[in-house]
Image (spheres, rainbow, N blue to C red):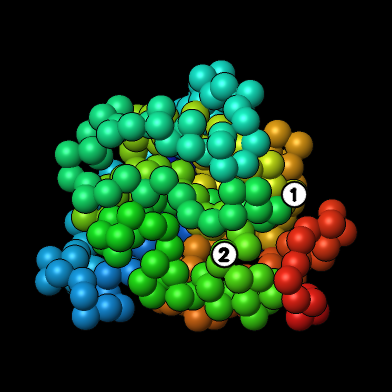
Amino acid sequence: MCCADVAGAMVCRMPDTLADLRALVADVRAALEDEALRGVVAEFSDEAPPEAVAVEASPRRATRPAVGGSWAKLADRAREKADTSVPVGAEGLQLIRDELGDCRRCNLCTGRSHIVFGVGDPSADLVIVGEAPGYHEDRRGEPFVGPAGEMLDKMLANVLGLDREEVHILNVVKCKPPENRNPLPDEVGACLPFLHRQIAAIQPKVILVVGTVALKALLDPSGGITRHRGQWGTLDGVPVMSTFHPAYLLRNPEGKRHTFADLKALGKRYDELGGRRTRPSPF
């Protein structure tokens, strides 16, 4: 987001109160942070290629997905295209994976190493939805690996008392965007019907979305994660909590206390709805 974009946003929405002004500043900060977030993961591992680190050191301005009405239209079209009458559990997920095939529905296919379909318990009571595969995810074909994955695992174990194998982890898009930029609207639109069908097959009791892209795609087309984290929404009748992306927390440790509170609230709802556990909740 350039300065002109920020200025334009402020002209369109002049704050009436100090609280409105603070909320506007939070939105602008969240947008700028979201611009810089893609590529954070590669910075924390010696396995990352030199060019991946260079993106963080000298970032190029990413092309942001459309906001407002465009995101809402994407979500509406995805629901219209998503046949949610799939078998429950592993059988349904396998049918969806077979239909996805060697996907060529958008240009992300040209630069990927692997399609990152998802991982975890096919009948999990908690589904976690991130934004897009990064370098490590693309190499391994699994979401949330590398430093961000380690952070997510700690969040699950230490706050929710759940292991990675007890949940199901998905991304909004299934192929790595170039230079870790945010996925574009056509890329999101190509993947969303499959994501909705995966969630329908899993039938979770609770959903956790991490990061602005996932928030916009599934919960609030005009939302920003800084303002909307910690608030409940619904997706097809399933309670949805949003919070910061684990990669954001690697770079901004001060956000951990907010995420801790969000996860505690999620854990409480998870237990109220009868979410399965192999060990007692930490809280």
Q: Quadrant of the C terminus?
A: bottom right
| Foreground pick, 117 / 150 | 117
| Residue at screen point 38% across, 75% down | 147
Answer few, some or many: residues within 10 Å of disc 1's Cα (few below 14, many 20 plus, some between 14 and 19): many
- Residue hosting label 1: 205
The amino acid on which the numbered mark 1 sits, given as a three-letter code, is: Lys
Give left or right: position of 254 versus 61. Answer: right
Give left or right: position of 64 versus 30. Answer: left
- Residue hosting label 2: 165
Answer few, some or many: residues within 10 Å of disc 2's Cα (few below 14, many 20 plus, some between 14 and 19): few
| Foreground pick, 251 / 146 | 146
| Residue at screen point 43% across, 63% down | 144
The amino acid on which the numbered mark 2 sits, given as a three-letter code, is: Glu
In the rendered image, residue 174, in percent from the top left (x then y), is placed at 37, 44
- Mark identifier at residue 48: none
Height in image: 24 above or below 247? above
Of labels 1 and 2, the one closer to you? 2
Query: Helix, strand or loop at disc 1?
Result: loop
Height in image: 279 above or below 168? below
As measured in the structure, the alpha-carbon distance from the residue carrying label 1 to the one carrying label 2 is: 16 Å
* Residue farthest right in this picture: 272
In the rendered image, residue 14, in percent from the top left (x then y), is placed at 57, 45
Q: Can the viewer see residue 227 in this picture?
A: no
| Residue at screen point 17% across, 39% down | 110
Height in image: 243 above or below 81? below
Report which quarter residue 99 is drawn in. top left
